[in-house]
Amino acid sequence: MRFKTLALALALVAAAVVAATAFAHQTTTSTLIGTDGPGFTITLTMHGKAVKTLKAGTYEFVIHDKSAIHGWSLDGPHGFAKDISAIPFMGTKTMTLKLKAGKYKFYCPNHETMMFGHFSAM
């Protein structure tokens, strides 16, 4: 009887480890890196590559604002709008955002006509 109890306990522990591992992978948040300045440039990258498409979901935005005359804002579907780094802030801001499917525009509020980029979330 002790052997069966021990075997059942080990099986339950193994199942709990597998379940915890599966849930840990589902809660991982990808990091997007944005920059503005010091010149008239604005970027959004993931793993060193320009972002063009993403899966809809939760992302951590790390914005490196390198100029007091620039900012980093994000607009998206259904009235989505976030000013992650406002003018005249300089430094690094981090924000976790849930992106829904649709088209997004990142831009500098002071120089939107020349400092902007687009990506889509699917």
Image (cartoon, rainbow, N blue to C red):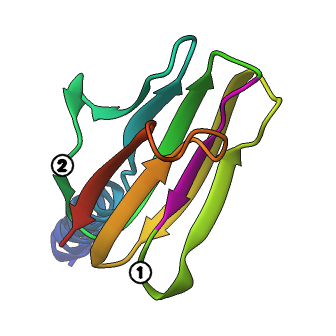
Which residue is located at x 57 percent, y 11 percent?
Answer: 38
- N-terminal of the pair, mark 2 or mark 1, is 2
Relative to 98, does residue 52 appear above or below in the rendering? above
| 2 and 1 marks in contact (CB < 8 Å) | no
Whether residue 10 is visible, yes or no, is: no
Q: Amino acid at mark 2?
A: Lys
Label 1 crowd (10 A; few <14 / some 14-19 / many >=20)? some
Q: Nearer the viewer, residue 23 or 72?
A: 72
Quarter of the figure with the N terminus: bottom left
Name of the residue lying farthest toward the top: 38
Q: Nearer the viewer, residue 11 or 2?
A: 11
Which residue is located at x 17 percent, y 67 percent?
Answer: 7
Which residues fall within the magenta stretch? 69-75
Determine whether the residue tagged by mark 2 lies in a helix, strand or loop: loop
- Within the image, what quadrant is residue 65 found in? top right
Which residue is located at x 57 percent, y 41 percent?
Answer: 108
Q: Is residue 122 left or right of residue 111?
A: left
- Which residue is tagged 2? 52
Determine whether the residue tagged by mark 1 lies in a helix, strand or loop: helix
Relative to 118, does residue 8 appear above or below in the rendering? below
Q: Position of residue 23 (x, y in %)?
A: 32, 65
Whether residue 102 is visible, yes or no, is: yes
Indicate yes or no whether the magenta region holds residue 83: no
Name of the residue lying farthest toward the bottom: 78
Indicate yes or no whether the magenta region holds residue 71: yes
Q: Position of residue 59 (x, y in %)?
A: 42, 54
Label 2 crowd (10 A; few <14 / some 14-19 / many >=20)? some
Instruction: Name the mark on residue 77.
Output: 1
Distance between mark 2 and mark 1 Cα atoms: 16 Å
